[in-house]
Amino acid sequence: MKRTLCCTVLVLMLFLTGCTDRLSVENVTFILLVGIDVDEEDHVVYSLSSPVFSKEAKKKEEELEVRAMTMRNARENFDRSVVASTLGGKVQVILLGKRIFEHKDWFQLMDVFYRDNKDTVLPTVVLVDGKVSDLINFAPKDKPRLSTYLTELLRTSHKRNITVNTTIQELHRQMYDKGITPSISEVRKDKNLLVMGTALLKEDGRYALMLDPLANKLFSTLREHRSGEFPITLTMPSHNEDSFYKLNKLSITATDISTKTKVKYEDNKFRYDIKVNMRVTLSERLYPINLDKNAKKIEKEIGEELEAQYKLLFNKIQTAKIDPIGLGLYARAKEYKQWKKVQDNWGEALSKAEVNVKVKIRIMSVGSIN
């Protein structure tokens, strides 16, 4: 019986998967950050950052930079200068220099990330206001390795709705869907890394404008998928003109947001009526007013101030002839006959549209004190 069992085990072991292709981490270069930029002479520059696992190495991160026509050419040049095998399936962030967005055909440079099945489509795409090389060589002593630091910074900023989180998969959709224009995170390196807000791109991928954190929060409330926190500080009508500091600031946190968008075509233009309902809590009030007696008045004033901010947001968007919110998706769904006529020049059509935003506020909590 024992002999039969041993023979059975030996036979089964012959079919076990071997480890002949095993690679040690010391012999692999995991690319975590990829940078693409254009230098002063209009040469495309590729750069990468990868962790170093060697015990002998004093520096725990390796940065490489090379001029090349394509990402594949760059990979070959990288392989000539690193001692380990280069693997790109672990890329977390793709950094794009702002000079790239001066050229409408820059998106072709991203082809390898979609075509190579060994690459992932989940890296976050980020616009760098400045040189990518300055950022990718940044090694702060009081922060974790750059890839971890940057990834966590972008994640936290997105959670607070300071910026968007656009993966290369989502970017591909935004670039080719005629009902929406692309939006990606924008960062800058000064003494530290700073998330500036959201970069909005034109239909052809060129840079249009940037939304600061407040504008991005309003922008995020109108998008199809909302998540994270929405703390907003507003300038309210002054209720105490005698105060030395003239404080008239009010901070709210939107805890429940719902939007309803209606579109119709009349008078040779599209018309959008957007209703935004917000349940909010007061987190800061820097002027004296009786909230119990004036709750409805405060709700109305908050709604009016937000409506004014939405109006400014849409003025910027329509002036730039872009559609980062995706209003074209509503036009295509509800007014397809008219949409079809302008789909190839939707930014121009949206710039002539009438957009009305109405905000209804309900205060759910005023905090621990009145």
Image: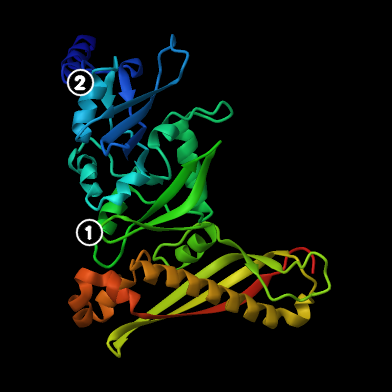
- Number of the label disc, if any, that sits on residue 176: 1
Colour convention of the picture: rainbow
Closest to the observer: 197 or 143?
197
Q: Residue 249 is drawn in which quadrant?
A: bottom right
Q: Label 2: which residue? A: 16
Residue at position x 31%, y 60% in the image: 202
Q: Amino acid at mark 2?
A: Leu
Closest to the observer: 313 or 284?
313
* Quarter of the image where the N terminus is located: top left
SS of the residue under disc 1: helix
SS of the residue under disc 2: loop
Residue at position x 59%, y 79% in the image: 304
Residue lying furthest front: 41
Q: Position of residue 101 (x, y in %)?
A: 31, 50
Q: Height in image: 36 above or below 354?
A: above
Q: Position of residue 145 (x, y in %)?
A: 48, 28
Crowd band around label 2 with a 10 angstrom C-alpha radius: few (<14), some (14–19), many (20+)? few
Q: Position of residue 307 (x, y in %)?
A: 53, 76
Q: Amino acid at mark 1?
A: Tyr
- Number of the label disc, if any, that sits on residue 129: none
* Left or right of 249 in this view: 85: left
Crowd band around label 1 with a 10 angstrom C-alpha radius: few (<14), some (14–19), many (20+)? few
Q: Height in image: 47 above or below 108?
A: above
* Quarter of the image where the C terminus is located: bottom right
